Amino acid sequence: MPLLLAALLLTGCATPEPPPGVTSVADLVLPFDAYKPTPGQRAVLANAHNLLVVRCMRRHGVTVNPPAEDEEAIAAADPGNTRRYGVADPRQAAEHGYHLAGGSPAKPWTAKLTKAARRQLNGRQGCLDRADAQLSRDTPKADWSWLALQDSLTLEQAAREPAVSQAVDRWKACMERAGHPYPSPEAAIADRRWNLDKPEVSDEEKQTASADVACKWSSGLVAAWYAADADLQRAVVRDNDRRFAAFRDNLGRRLDRATALLK
């Protein structure tokens, strides 16, 4: 670790004790996570969906070959909670700066299909819709868009909690001492010097992101934001027990059907 960052961690402003066990991004497990598919489960669902699409398209005289979905590739492309509070992983910041580690997305496998084939695939009641319907047949209704909305709301509401605002102030002071005077973590990642749409990552971006991460942890910002976020999510789960039971049942039945299809 660079001497400057080590000094920041050792001499930063006094911070509140973090929630028990919250010392790295690996500890950022939220209540909603228990109801979402894991990368491995997402791979099972996606591969079963692809199999149904292949069969459907074949019945219409079209051969398609969607690539197999891989658990590790899915996990690499989706940072999950490791980026929920901005860049927070020291290793990722040192290697990739503010860029996502997954790199640029691959060209979609549908790109080479004819216009007629794409219509058969994507149109109303096309093969994609039919595959979705087949995997979800006879499963409890679950409003996943509602869960996604709540996921966003708890993050935003947590950011307005006094403990989080105070931690942001400590983060700002820490970053200023490190030579990076930003008004907020959002301003740091939005700096025009970093072109996040291109793969190149400058040493300056890596150094700034590394300081950002060090200040997030030494200021208690990650821990405070996570604690507020988790409290809000627990309240949502408690107040919507039937909705969350439906999420669990819906996912479980779709996984059973997907697993059976892939045997």
Image (spheres, grey):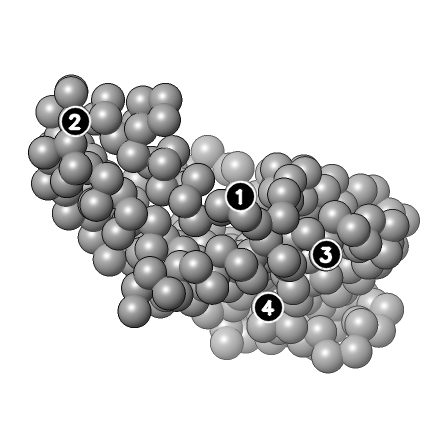
Question: What amino acid type is highlighted by mark number 4?
Answer: Val
Give the Cα distance between marks 3 and 1: 37 Å
| Residue that badge 3 annotates | 245
> Are the residues tagged 3 and 1 within 8 Å (C-beta)?
no
Q: Is residue 147 left or right of residue 39?
A: right
Is residue 185 at all visible to an observer of this figure?
no
Give the Cα distance between marks 2 and 3: 39 Å
Give the Cα distance between marks 4 and 1: 18 Å
Q: Nearer the viewer, residue 149 or 19?
A: 149
Give the Cα distance between marks 1 and 2: 41 Å
Residue 60 vertical position relative to residue 199 in the rendered view, above or below: above
Question: Sequence-wise, which precedes: disc 2 or disc 3?
Answer: 2
Q: Nearer the viewer, mark 4 or mark 1?
A: 4
Q: Could you say whether the residue bearing mark 4 is in a helix, strand or loop? A: helix
On residue 117, which mark appears?
2
Label 3 crowd (10 A; few <14 / some 14-19 / many >=20): some
Q: Could you say whether the residue bearing mark 1 is in a helix, strand or loop? A: helix
Question: What amino acid type is highlighted by mark number 2?
Answer: Ala
Residue located 53% across and 43% down the image: 189
Residue located 26% across and 43% down the image: 53
Task: Give the residue at the far front of this rendering.
Answer: 138
| Residue that badge 1 annotates | 189
Give the Cα distance between marks 4 and 3: 27 Å
| Residue that badge 4 annotates | 25
Quarter in which the C terminus is drawn: bottom left
Q: Is residue 65 left or right of residue 78?
A: left
